[in-house]
Amino acid sequence: MQLLENKIAIVTGAARGIGEAIAIKLAEHGAHIAFTYVSESSAEKAASLTAKLESMGVKAKAWRSNAGNFAESEAFVNDVVKEFGTVDICVNNAGISKDNLLMRMTPEQWDDVMEVNLKSVFNMTKQVIRPMMKARKGSIINMSSIIGIRGNAGQSSYAASKAGIIGFTKSIAQELGSRNVRCNAIAPGFIETDMTNYLKESEGAQAYLAKIPLGRFGAAEEIGNTTLFLASDLSSYITGQVISACGGLNI
């Protein structure tokens, strides 16, 4: 059974990691995928993902676009609507971390994280709500983090950006509920990707694992599954919520 047959889904930052897993999972269930990547070094990966998605029988196209830039986000969504006809699902996944203790953090490091992680969610959501409100349906899924709920030493900028996403999500859910547009957030815990390999390989890896009731790091595909649920009609009465996909770390 395909839960998203012929739906149009946007996924930002999908050339690798969690974003890639999400794009593949949505395509497996019949969604056509428009996704972004931001650096030239990711172009080859983006092309490979496009080919993989198309081999699954859906339409797919990659755009080199910076979700943290308002003008680029506007142009991207306009292009998607022209190319695909509408937007049914938007997964705001683009994100970075520039970890540092506050006493050593520069204003530039703080601003970079806020632009990519938080401003991008504003930029993209502002654009996709137009076709969604017109159609009186849609699902917006924002990628927060367990760090946005718990905080973490050395990650104040990352935690602040991900906590901001939660407040934004709850507000947008209240604004758009009357138009049948839902907005939810996912707060992943420690997920095995190239961004988190250093944690798994660090001396403190066992200490991290000891805090997780399920006793393991998560897989990107598991975040894809959570996203699929929120994107589909299985979650048709769920909005303004934060699902912690963290192996129990937030208990």
Image: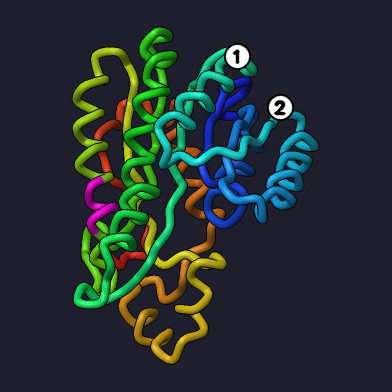
**Left or right, residue 197 beside residue 185:** right
In front: 28, or 146? 146
Q: Position of residue 97 (x, y in %)?
A: 39, 63
N-terminal of the two: label 2 or label 1? 2
Work out whether residue 1 can be spotted: no
Q: Is residue 57 above or below residue 135?
A: below
Give the residue type at disc 2. Lys
Residue count near mark 1 (Cα–Cα under 10 Å), binned few <14, some 14–19, many ≥20: few
Select label 2 or label 1 by which is in front.
1
* Quadrant in which the N terminus is drawn: top right
Q: Secondary structure at mark 1?
A: helix
Give the residue type at disc 1. Lys
Residues shaded magenta: 160-164
Work out whether residue 48 can be spotted: yes
In front: 204, or 158? 158
**CA gap, disc 2 to disc 1?**
14 Å
Q: Position of residue 53 (x, y in %)?
A: 72, 38
* Quadrant in which the C terminus is drawn: bottom left
Q: Which residue is mark 2?
A: 59
Query: Does the residue at mark 2 contact the one at mark 1 (Cβ under 8 Å)?
Result: no
Residue displayed at 47% across by 64% down = 191
Residue displayed at 53% across by 46% down = 13
Residue displayed at 33% across by 50% down = 144
Answer whether residue 163 is magenta in the image. yes
